[in-house]
Amino acid sequence: MANKKLTLQIDFRSGLPIYTQIVNQVQAQVASGILKPDDQLPTVRALAEELRVNFNTVARAYRILDEARIISTQQGRGTFITEIPPPKVTERLRRESLEALTQRYVSEALRLGFSKGEIRQMVSDQLKSWNESGKSEE
């Protein structure tokens, strides 16, 4: 398969380790179907250069993803997304991705001085607005 363009956004201020951000985002893209089985990922070195992070950081993320059987590195061929995990695993990955996204959002909002009540109200208002405008996914 062709080398799939992996799109990652690293937040250097989040307090969440960079390797964890990489793992979470790859898991989310697999769970949502953006990354599919046999999609080839960039080499560790290429991704480290693209993200402007240490080579060892990306290597650690790839090692975690490999241990979780989300990716497989084949000597001389590259790193690939493995077969789609069973629905139970996919649902867990989706939930973990949503949890990480929510933690980042809430942490940043709290850091900016918003109260938990303001955050809760804004999320509620936004969901209501999307529902009323027909943007709702469900």
Image (cartoon, rainbow, N blue to C red):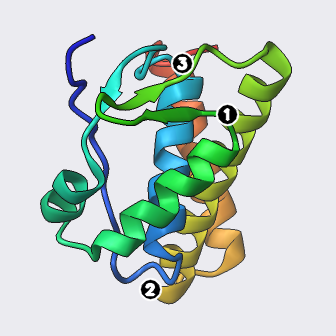
Label 3: element kind: loop
Q: Which of 45 and 91 is in front in this view?
A: 45
Q: Which one is in front, 104 or 72?
A: 72
Q: Earlier in the sequence, mark 1 or mark 3?
A: 1
Q: Where is residue 123 in the image (x, y as percent from the top left)?
A: 60, 51
Tag nearer the camera, 1 or 2: 1
Q: In this view, does 33 lie above or below 28?
A: above
Label pair 1/3, CB-CB below 8 angstroms: no
Mark 1 or 2 closer to N-term? 1
Position of residue 24 measured from the top left corner of the image (x, y, whole percent): 55, 51
Residue 136 — which label?
3
Q: Which amino acid does label 1 sit on?
A: Arg
Answer with left or right where residue 101 lies relative to residue 18: right
Counting from the top left corner in percent of width and height, residue 90 is at 72, 24
Judged from the image, the secondary structure of the residue bearing numbered disc 1 is: helix
Q: Which of 4 and 137 is in front in this view?
A: 4
Q: Is residue 113 visible?
A: no
Disc 3 from disc 2: Cα separation: 28 Å
Q: Which amino acid does label 3 sit on?
A: Ser
Quadrant into which the C terminus falls:
top right
Q: Which residue is tagged 1?
A: 94
Q: In this view, does 1 lie to the left or right of 20?
A: left
Residue 38 sits in quarter: top left
- Residue occupying image coordinates x 14% and y 57%: 50
Residue, disc 2: 112
Question: Percent position (x, y) of residue 41?
Answer: 31, 34
- Give the residue drawn at x 78%, y 15%: 86
Label 3 or label 2, whichever comes before in sequence order: 2
Q: Distance between the residues labelled 1 and 3?
A: 18 Å
- Above or below, 115 against 24 in this view is below
- Spatial CA span between label 1 and label 2: 27 Å
